């Protein structure tokens, strides 16, 4: 199959500027015009179809054009598309807040809406800082984050991220967080368990808190999987220990579950595996099943109470976005929660994850694979030049891009993070489709490393 420039693709390249893209790569990298989606499949205007192995940037949970979510949005469209969310409210926003409070760890009792993941991160950071200020702690002005973490692209969210590719250019514009070594199990010593390594890395966090807790508002983490940083995974006991440190040193814990929430790691929320409640939980991406942009920041009654005062005390959280609490997006989220309530989603995911694990396991033997790792419905394969020393391929060789192009030609949308090939499919995938997805990626890996 050869890629042709379609009318739409050409018009796109003449007028649109795409996210996370060096536009100069096109058209060596084809621009693909999608006309419709159905379940796990995306269809282009040339009659090709692609298995969406990355859930359209981790947003999709139950497949494209999922009928229950689609019909909820259609229904909502005829009632109320949007309304100012200050002084006004509506059924979908209220019901969604109530249901999110019910299903998240107990103790999270307030919901603040935003309209994308990065905005939710901004809200979490500002709320944490403002809470301490309202309580008279004026020295708490900084944040701690883990090496290799990713929390979004707006300046505040990028500030607490540690992916050089996205951050370094803008470093002069950013806040300077304390970057603490990640419990990422890839970095453990040979023979060391994930758990033992997590404990060692907790000691690093303790040392930072001992020195700097007085100036720290919060530590922000991606629970269990640092996704954009390369699907880096770690043991849940790290989160448990971090919660204890946060309590001991009076530092907030912000759990960014934007990518890992809603069943991705095997539990509804990743924090559940550590039996903890963060002070802030950030949700987006899968929140609407991948249909519409929406984010929610959940926090405790205690934090909420620190803002609740006479207007003239200047304690209010005056942050806002025009589309806060959009009714269409809230309806999509409610319909998504219905599917979790009415179907055995997590049970089915356990079976699918086990199958995915069996399919990717043989890649461990590949001469250019340093590690195969998995947490629930996320599996990742680390390509390297030298297996023994784990020396990566020179970045300029763009081996991951070769895998991307190979898989596209063979009908699978696989978008590696550098040389890390990962699988993060919608939950509607079948075992046969898992086999197709992994077989295609394996062939792509062979192609790109030969
Ligand atoms: C994607 C992501 C974000 C940013 O969300 P956007 O909606 O893309 O702004 C923040 N945190 C994590 C962990 C993410 O994966």
Image: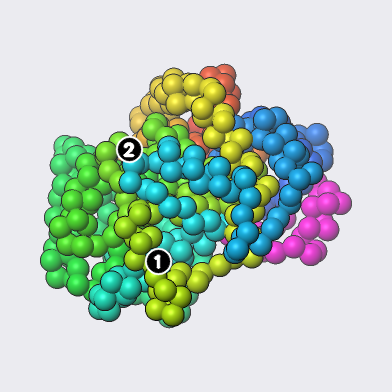
Mark-to-mark CA distance, 2 and 1:
29 Å
Q: Quadrant of residue 36?
A: top right
Give the percent coordinates (x, y) of residue 332: 63, 41
Viewer-side residue, 122 vs 366: 122
Instruction: Name the residue that disc number 2 marks.
Output: 272
Instruction: Name the residue that disc number 1 marks.
Output: 308
Give the percent coordinates (x, y) of residue 60: 59, 39
- Is the C-beta separation of discs 2 and 1 under 8 Å? no
Q: Is residue 2 magenta?
A: yes
Relative side of 171 to 302, left or right: right
Query: Within 10 Å of the Cα at label 2, are there few (<14), some (14-19), or many (20+) other Cα atoms?
Result: some
Give the percent coordinates (x, y) of residue 436: 57, 25
> Which residue is depicted at the point 38% across and 54% down?
299
> Which residue is depicted at the point 35% across and 54% down?
301
Relative side of 282 to 134, left or right: right
Q: Quadrant of residue 377?
A: top left
Q: Is residue 380 visible?
A: no
Query: Magenta part of the protein: which range?
Result: 1-27
Q: Is residue 97 magenta?
A: no
> Which residue is depicted at the point 51% across and 27% down?
341
On whether ligand 1 comes within 8 Å of the CB at mark 2, the answer is no
Give the percent coordinates (x, y) of residue 331: 64, 42
Q: Quadrant of residue 312?
A: bottom left
**Quadrant location, the N terminus:** top right
326 w.r.t. 145: above or below? above
Q: Is residue 327 visible?
A: yes
> Which residue is depicted at the point 75% across and 38% down?
75
Q: Which label sits on residue 8?
A: none
Viewer-side residue, 119 vs 319: 319
Q: Which color scheme did the rendering employ for the protein?
A: rainbow
Relative side of 54 to 395, left or right: right
Query: Within 10 Å of the Cα at label 1, are there few (<14), some (14-19), or many (20+) other Cα atoms?
Result: some
């Amino acid at each position: 199959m050869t890629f042709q420039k379609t009318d739409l693709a050409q018009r796109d390249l003449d007028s649109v500027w795409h996210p996370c893209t060096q536009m100069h790569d096109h058209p060596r990298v084809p621009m693909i015009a999608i006309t419709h989606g159905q379940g796990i499949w995306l269809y282009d205007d040339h009659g090709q179809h692609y298995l969406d192995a990355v859930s359209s940037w981790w947003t999709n949970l139950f497949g494209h054009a999922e009928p229950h979510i689609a019909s909820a949005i259609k229904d909502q469209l005829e009632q109320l598309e949007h309304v100012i969310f200050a002084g006004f409210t509506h059924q979908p926003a209220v019901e969604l807040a109530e249901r999110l409070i019910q299903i998240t760890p107990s103790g999270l009792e307030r919901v603040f809406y935003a309209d994308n993941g990065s905005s939710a991160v901004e809200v979490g950071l500002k709320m944490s800082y403002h809470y301490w200020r309202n309580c008279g702690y004026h020295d708490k002005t900084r944040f701690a984050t883990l090496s290799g973490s990713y929390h979004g692209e707006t300046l505040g969210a990028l500030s607490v991220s540690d992916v050089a590719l996205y951050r370094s250019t803008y470093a002069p514009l950013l806040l300077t967080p304390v970057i603490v070594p990640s419990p990422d199990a890839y970095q453990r010593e040979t023979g060391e368990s994930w758990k033992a390594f997590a404990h060692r890395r907790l000691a690093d966090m303790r040392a930072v808190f001992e020195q700097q807790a007085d100036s720290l508002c919060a530590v922000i983490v991606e629970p269990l999987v640092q996704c954009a940083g390369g699907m880096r995974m770690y043991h849940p006991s790290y989160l448990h220990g971090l919660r204890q440190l946060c309590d001991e040193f009076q530092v907030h814990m912000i759990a960014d579950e934007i990518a890992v929430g809603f069943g991705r790691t095997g539990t509804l929320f990743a924090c559940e595996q550590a039996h903890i409640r963060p002070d802030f939980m950030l949700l987006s991406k899968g929140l609407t099943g991948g249909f519409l942009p929406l984010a929610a920041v959940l926090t405790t009654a205690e934090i909420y109470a620190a803002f609740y005062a006479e207007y003239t005390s200047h304690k209010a959280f005056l942050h806002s976005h025009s589309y806060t609490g959009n009714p269409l997006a809230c309806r999509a989220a409610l319909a998504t929660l219905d599917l979790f309530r009415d179907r055995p989603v997590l049970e089915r995911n356990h079976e699918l994850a086990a199958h995915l694990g069996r399919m990717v396991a043989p890649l461990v033997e590949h001469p250019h694979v340093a590690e195969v790792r998995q947490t629930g419905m996320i599996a990742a394969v680390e390509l390297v030049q030298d297996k023994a020393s784990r020396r990566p391929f020179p970045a300029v060789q763009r081996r991951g891009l070769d895998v991307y192009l190979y898989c596209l030609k063979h009908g699978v949308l696989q978008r590696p993070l550098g040389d890390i090939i990962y699988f993060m499919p919608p939950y509607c995938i079948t075992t046969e489709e898992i086999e197709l997805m992994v077989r295609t990626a394996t062939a792509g890996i062979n192609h790109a490393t030969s």
